[in-house]
Image: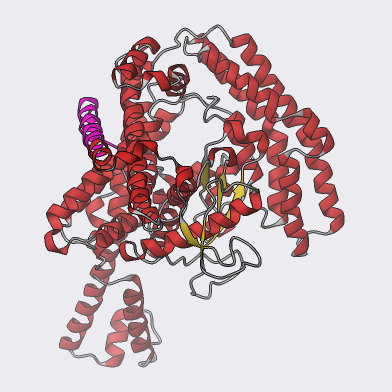
Amino acid sequence: MLNSFQILLIFRVLFLFSRTYTVKSICWSKFCMKLKFSRKLRILTFSLIATLAAIFCLYLYETKDTRQFEQLSQDLLYTELSGNTISLHYTLAYPENYGLSADPILPSSFTDVDTRAQVTEWQRRLSCIDPQKLDPQDRYAYLLFDRFLALTLEGSDFTYYTDPLSPSSGMVSGLPVLLADYTFRTKKDVEDYLGILEQTGAYFDALIRYEQEKSSAGLFMSDTSADNVIEQCDSIMDPVLLKDGSHFLQQTFTERLDGLASDEIITGEEKQQYIDKNNLLLTTVMAPAYERVGDAFLVLKGTGTNPYGLCYYPEGKEYYTYLLAQTTGSSRSIPEIRRLLEKDYQKNFHALRDLIKNHPGLLKLSPEDFSLSLNMQNSYSDHPEEPGDTDLPTKPAATSDILCRLSEAILDDLQKQMKPDFPKLTCIPEAKAGQEHDGESNSVSCQIKKVSSSMEAYSSPAYYLTPPIDDLWRNTIYLNEPNITDDLTLYTTLAHEGYPGHLYQTVYSQSFLNQQNASCIRSMLHYGGFVEGWAVYVENLSYGYAAQLTKNEEAAAYIESCRLNRNLHLCLYSYMDIAIHYDGATPEQIGRFLENLGLGQHTNVETIYEYLVEEPCNYLKYYLGYLEFLSLKQKAEELWGTDYSDYRFHKFVLETGPSDFRSLGELVTAHPYPGQNFGNQS
């Protein structure tokens, strides 16, 4: 099919052809008479013009669907990002390049009242597009969006079942983290940030109204969870820290301004004005907002009707079924998932039993009994006595500075060890506003930061902050220092968060999609099961990498036992998640279940149960996602035969990008040779 450039070129040639005859009349008949065209030549000329007109009409017809899909993609981008400045900032570093520029705004509604109408309209527009007339990349984006909308429509029936103020992952603890790492690239970023702070009062007031409505519907959280939220409100915005200027939202704000000042983007006077305004907003707007949330939860506490799983709520079992599919990206039924978990548990249990049988000394070992050897030159100390291998201390978090240096060395080692089985990471970023990109790849950097001491109790052991899709080469990993208990934990944690985990997967997949000019729909859809499942998958591989660094066989066997033990725990928690929320298991039943497995004596059943109630499907997002990748890998091995390699499988997954597992599986089946997704050769 002719492209637009070829069509325009043909018409340009015709135009030049007509000018050579110095046409002085717009009347076609006079033109023909003046040139004394023969009848045959006139017929040929008319035929040529008719043919070109037909081709042009055909071009417009065949590209109609592509143009409609591109417009739909842009509209989705604008709709999703224009109503939340934080989401916009974390998605796009330079929104003006995408036609997005607005005053700072935070969401003001948290119900699903308008969701159904909006989703129905997206579905209507999507139905007007023929996916068979789209190129392979857009066709796959169409498929993902179509399935995403169908699932979202299903979820719109469950108003007030979501919990944006959950003590484990809600916005009371989540918003400060997002604010602390809100990047300042321009003066406008600072002003937007301060504009967001000004709206935190209204934002949390809207959340309070949502929780009040949730309570009226009989769906408010348990008293234990409410107490946890109240405690967070009291401690996170500590008035003592705010008063003496040592709060992390004050310190990180000043640090970011220092960068702008050193680049002469702001003056010293402007910097001080911004600091003063930040302090004012934190103490007069944000801190009082947290007080109001705490007070509201004191009033609402006791209105919760269910301290157990979701199935005790009206339609709770149906909601859990939806949430499981939405969170994990798996299309398996709950009975099928249960069987998958049982089979995996038995496999790992027998493997661990056999390992201990062959290495009876494992039962007496602990992480302190061995260490990993890494090349720590220029990382462990500023002036190492001798270059070469240095053992990691068993307690690497002696100081934050040493922890960061150790982390950098581990990330270097992980990148070296993963090379044979993973494609090289290259990041070709988008051009900045007002600039043109030189076409050269930028090296990907990673900054290791420590979670603020005031947030340690509410933060994960570690987390990776996803960079904007047009600024991929600057990345950040946060480590929660008290949770880093030994060198193996640090090593596998950084594999999960960094290489070949979140950082590597995010930058590789998004960079590839950017280079392919893939629809921005791909960046708007989140697939937690894919993202976390991949991280658990490569974390499992990292235990093998760590074993390569040990000094003896017994230590390597111990590392393998740690891997199996971790998988057993993740599998068990995933299984209990289903038991609690779908089957209605009580704390007493969970306690007996663990005792039958020989785990009750050393397990805090109450804490486990409380977390699983607060965060339904969270463990499944990680572990079912991991099992789905193992299943996908097995399918690829069967279909690709002798063409299969781990390298090709990883490349296929990374270049396909985040998806639901049903669509990924169909893609493997439809293209039974490695590297054939979207027409790319391996």
Observer-nearest residue: 371 or 194? 371
The answer to whether 62 appears left or right of 121 in the picture is left
Q: Quadrant of residue 53?
A: bottom left
Residue visible at 31% across and 19% down in the picture: 579
From the viewer's side, name the closer residue of 338 and 210: 338
Residue 553 among those drawn in magenta: no
Taking 185 as reference, is 246 above or below it?
Answer: above
Query: In the drawing, does residue 125 fall left or right of residue 645?
Result: right
Residue 514 x, y percent position in the rendering: 42, 61
How would you classify the magenta stretch by its main secondary structure?
A: helix
Q: Position of residue 594 (x, y in %)?
A: 34, 19
Q: Is residue 628 above or below residue 633?
A: above
Q: Decide if residue 519 is in sight here.
A: no
* Residue nearer the viewer, 252 or 459: 459
| Residue 628 found in image quarter | top left
Residue 81, percent across and down? 53, 44
Range of magenta residues: 330-351
Q: Quadrant of the C terminus?
A: bottom left
Furthest residue to the right?
Answer: 269
Q: In the rendered view, does 676 fall on the left or right side of 547? A: left
